[in-house]
Image (cartoon, rainbow, N blue to C red):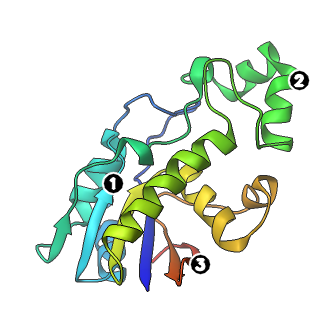
Amino acid sequence: MTVWHWVRHGPTHEKAFVGWRDVPADLSDKTRINRLQNHLPKEALLVSSDLIRASATADAVQRPSHRRLPSEPELREFNFGLWDGMHFSQVAKEHPALSRAYWEKPGDVKPPEGESWNMAAARVNARVDALNAVHPDAEIIAVAHIGVILTQVQRGLGVTPYKALSHEIDNLSCTRIVWSGGTPTVSQINHCP
């Protein structure tokens, strides 16, 4: 049994799409970070996306007893392509039908020069499967992004991407997914200690 503790990175305070743009996280709320750290297993592997908002959050929650794995580009947020850095209202104005379909019919719909839900989920799923194979029976803390975590919620609940999008994943929250016999089970979503 492998237990994944998915942590969403600290807030960026961005008011626009943030995908592969490398923007920092605000990690000034030490009380909240300490509560999160105390909620996470004391003995665990620790991995993060290679984007600074995730890797810096991983640094903030890391304990000496955690074994840090290399940062993973495959755990990056969705690639929003040309939308990255644009305000949501600007995207809706410039691409009304496409932006509506992106949220209402996620799956194969993708932003210009970006990736779809299905493309991002396949990327993340492959990396999770590989880490499960290399680290069976491990506790894994994975610091990543809202989209990444929602792909794993979708997988664990066996729901559509649209249904997965109905779940909130707050900054510095923990979502726990237990893998047993190759099957994921979601045991906690968006826990904010």
Query: Residue 97: which disc?
Result: 2
What amino acid is labelled 3 in the image?
A: Thr
Q: Position of residue 155 (x, y in %)?
A: 65, 65
Q: Quadrant of residue 25?
A: top left
Q: Residue at x 86, y 21 (%)?
A: 96
Of the residues under marks 1 and 2, which one precedes in the sequence? 1
Q: Residue at x 60, y 17 (%)?
A: 82
What residue would you read off at disc 3?
183
Please tell me whether mark 2 sits on a helix, a strand or a loop.
helix
Please tell me whether mark 3 sits on a helix, a strand or a loop.
strand
Q: CA distance from mark 1 to mark 2?
A: 34 Å
Quadrant into which the C terminus falls: bottom left
Residue 190, compared with residue 139, is above or below; it is: above
Q: Position of residue 32 (x, y in %)?
A: 36, 68
Query: Residue 172, can we see it?
Result: no
What residue would you read off at disc 1?
48
Please tell me whether mark 1 sits on a helix, a strand or a loop.
strand
Q: CA distance from mark 3 to mark 2?
A: 36 Å
Report whether 50 appears left or right of 161.
left
Q: Are marks 1 and 2 in contact (CB under 8 Å)?
A: no
Q: How many residues crowd mark 1 within 10 Å: few (<14), some (14–19), many (20+)?
A: many
Q: Position of residue 44 (x, y in %)?
A: 26, 77
What amino acid is labelled 2 in the image?
A: Ala
Query: Residue 22, can we see it?
Result: yes
Of the residues under marks 1 and 3, which one precedes in the sequence? 1
Q: Position of residue 33 (x, y in %)?
A: 32, 66
Q: Residue at x 49, y 50 (%)?
A: 145
